[in-house]
Amino acid sequence: MPFLVRIAFRNLLEHKAKSLIIGILLALGVVILVVGNSFMDTAAKGVKDTFIGNYTGDLFIAAKTKTSVSLFGVASPGGREETPSLPFYDKVVAHLKADPAVADITSQVTGFALVSPKDSSDQGFAMLFGIDPATYYRLFQNTKVIEGRLLEPGEEGLVLSRNQVENYAKNAGFKPKVGEQLILTGMNKGGFKIRSVPLVGIIAFNTESEATDFISYADVNTVRILSGLTLGADEDNPVSQEAKALLAAGEDSLFGGESVVAPGALKASAPGPGPAASLAPPRSGPDSGAWHFAMARLKKPGEAPKVAASLNAWFAKEGIDAQASGWKEAAGPFAASIDVVRIVFDVAIAIVAVVAVIIMMNTLVISVIERTGEIGTMRALGAQKSFVRRMFLVETLTIAAIFGVVGVILAFASIGGLDAMHIRATNPFLKILFAGETLHPAVDPASVIWSLVLVAAVAVAAHLYPVAIALKVEPIRAMQVE
Amino acid sequence: MVIVELRDVRKVYPLGKVEVEAVKGVSFCIEKGDFISIAGPSGSGKTTILNMIGCVDRPTAGLVRIGDRQTKDLGDKELTTLRHETLGFIFQSFNLIPVLSVFENIEFPLLLGKQRMHAKEKKEWIDYLVEEVGLSDWRRHKPTELSGGQRQRVAIARALAGKPAIVLADEPTANLDSGTGEQILELMKKINREMQTTFIFSTHDAKIVELADHVIRLRDGLVIENLRNGADASGLCAEGGTRAAASAAGA
């Protein structure tokens, strides 16, 4: 064993109380870091897997916007900015299909609506994902049917989540039933849009969380109309005079009548394939109408940043005002919430680290003062200042290594214990943090190494001032030892 | 051959707002291989002079020469190297490193500096020193497990480990009973004869002074007597200093 390490070990044993104070701080630091990072990583991985697997795919393509755009629309301070449709959709999709890295694609329109039963003023909110069932369910098998069924290709209808139905029953005063005709009211720059659609099914998400509770699915044409997307995006399918008259109608006249909207009337006027397309043969991809987003599954998910960069270069070259990004941008506020939690955790760790450095520094200063005679003797015998510096560094790193390993063992035991306890998330924040209903923390080896490095860095930082004091000890101190 | 030269050395310590002159212009020379006692009562400047010879303190004025090097020209790093290569220390309070065994304490100076002894050679040399100071059965013991006399023996062996030209001992028997003190001095004398190592020790004990072949007596920071083998040695500097300077110039 190298001489300095031997001295370090012996000194740590000789000064047990101080070694323990510093060691416990270091071990505690490792436990907090490893367990905390495990929480963070579990949450981040859970959200990532949930979104990639169920909602965003590996690649998310949207129109360029001034503010950030996610699967849930454009982030605008007042919530009034409408999400633009993806420009040159056909060209973009054709390019994606031709890319050998892309395994499959689907598209989506995101809209918002108030849901109410026919002949009732009770209303509940819904975020609507307008999808092409054929391609969407091929990419995302994210739900299980509780009642009814999923949307068929070309079918007009609505699928609500179980939690959403329960939410309506609890807060909006109505409980939608499968087969029931529901009124969807959307609002956009063009005014109110109203559609009457049947509730086709009630589903439960495979991974239920706050992120998915309010998501409902509808056929794309319904969502296009509610979002006002078809008017601007598909001029080949002008809205009929009948529909325009309906849209221009006053609120009282819309809600006052027994039969608000004749489903057939809108069916007939709905642009795009709509109900008429239900008779058409199944397509290999989404229709060529207006879409907000395209999502792609890659053959190698790890290549997402590379493929996104290549796509963005192509957009620039072709003058297409679109942007490709990964799941994080697509997940929007939900990915950001994990980042916020991590920032809060990192700030807390930084504060704890500063406190630990101060405590350790004081303890080490006392140790140096106690060893002044010893340091002076070493200097008198011919030890250079660099030797004294190395000696303290080795002692610091030795204690960091020993108690770092102790910390890792304790952290693994804690994580194992927490995993075995099956702790349930009791509020939305915990659901995000746990990445689901139950806490199942996992340890990333890189995070363990990072924690050890960080703790060693804290220990080294804490030893700098005491070492500066040690280096000021003159060899003459050896002569003054009593 | 003169190995140590002090010429008109003065040392002033600030003590609050006043200055205390511990050494008031001391000059003497020491021949290589001598067994020298710097004697005098408490406060006479013995330890201050020893500190300056040991390169752990610098004179306020005057010149200290160790071998062919003037200490005032040297920085901390060079002084440390000079101490390591030329000087050995025996302290009044032994100053052993508490966490190291007898063997490791003696080994310590050999682990410093750039030139390292081969492992086998080093072990044999330390074994020899351990045997020489009579601690063969105590080599694995820690300092706290030894008596005062044994600790000072370890300190002597440690001082000799680097094969220094000069060993400095500041009141080496002060913390020992008289019997043990005599044994320690006899050991130092024996090593002085066998290895031709120059021993410079400070003491206020008249009995111990008798063992030295060169005695420098101090009082109030001044040399009052400088006798080598009973004869006045104040002229040694002119003769030896010239020799040392000539030798250094030749080198």
Image (spheres, coloured by chain):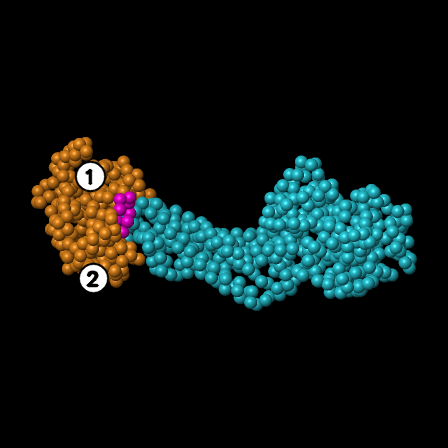
Looking at the rendered structure, the secondary structure element under dot 1 is loop
A236 and B216: which is toward the camera: A236
Chain letter for mark 2: B
Looking at the rendered structure, the secondary structure element under dot 2 is helix
Which residues are drawn in magenta? B108-116
Q: Position of residue A27 (x, y in %)?
A: 46, 59
* Tag shown at residue B164: none
Q: Residue at x 18, y 51 (%)?
A: B203
Query: Which of the marked residues, 2 or 1, is nearer the chain's N terminus?
Result: 1
Residue that lies at the very extreme toward the front in this rendered image: A281
Chain letter for mark 1: B
Quadrant, the N terminus of chain A: bottom left
What residue is disc 2 on?
B137
Q: Which chain did the image draw in cyan? A: A
A214 and B140: which is toward the camera: A214
Would residue A305 be visible to someone looking at this image? yes
Q: Is residue B113 magenta?
A: yes
